[in-house]
Image: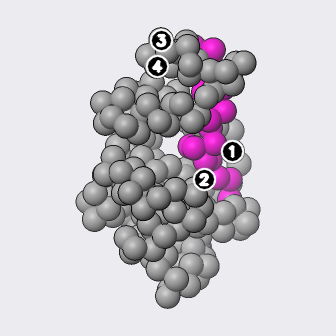
Amino acid sequence: MLRIGITGGIGSGKSTAARIFNVLGIPVFSSDDAAKRLMNEDEDLKKKITGSFGEESYVNGELNRKYIAHVAFSDPKKIELLNSIVHPATIKYAISWMKKQDAPYVIKEAALIFESGSNQYLDYVIGVKCPLSLRIERTMERNNVSEEEVKARMKLQMDEDKKMNLCDFIIVNDEKQMLIPQVLSLHKKFSGKEKV
């Protein structure tokens, strides 16, 4: 079974592409969803987060996402610290999840595949590429945030061109090229119907 990563900067549309793979019957692991769940359910992780970010990190046992986002995104060192706590737990969970799947390939959707080092556990990585202006517009609309907030978050991510150069395959999601045929073409490759 092939282990395929799918990544892209904030607002690139990687989740949309991942959903298309899922509709095709391919199991998709969302690193974001898994991280959120683990931060609420994994007692060891909760202790580490509270130890690093204070008691305000949790309210009635639930992650105080607003507080954590505010603290982490205001300082690159804090986001690094949070990632160093959460990434290993998420990667371990993803590896165990992949082993349980029964499909020609699985998709792991994550914004920080290269940054977290999880690419070493994958066979290939797909990059979802999108023009900067469109990424900003989508993120502002989806997260109800200002352009400045989006740009601040983007600064914390790896340079988009650098990230795309590390990927084995590229999907262009610029609202000009159709997304579904690009996903179908890769699906054929990964399902063994064409040479990868």
Q: Residue furthest bottom?
A: 176
Helix, strand or loop at disc 4? helix
Which residue is at a point 54% across and 52% down the rendered structure image? 109
The amino acid beneath tag 3 is: Gly
The amino acid beneath tag 1 is: Gln
Query: Are the two marked residues, 4 and 3, in contact with CB atoms closer than 8 angstroms?
Result: yes
160 or 119, which is in the foreground?
A: 160
Which residue is at a point 55% across and 50% down the rendered structure image? 108
> For this view, does 93 lie left or right of residue 158?
right
Determine which residue is flagged by label 4: 53
Q: Which residues are magenta?
A: 26-44
Determine which residue is flagged by label 1: 101
Helix, strand or loop at disc 3? helix
Q: CA distance from mark 4 to mark 1?
A: 35 Å
Q: Earlier in the sequence, mark 3 or mark 2?
A: 3
Q: Is residue 31 magenta?
A: yes
Helix, strand or loop at disc 1? loop
Determine which residue is flagged by label 3: 51
Q: Quadrant of residue 99?
A: top right
Q: Earlier in the sequence, mark 4 or mark 1?
A: 4
Determine which residue is flagged by label 2: 106
Q: Quadrant of residue 81?
A: top left
Q: CA distance from mark 4 to mark 3?
A: 6 Å
Q: Residue 51: x percent and y percent?
A: 47, 11
Looking at the rendered structure, which numbered label has been put on residue 145?
A: none
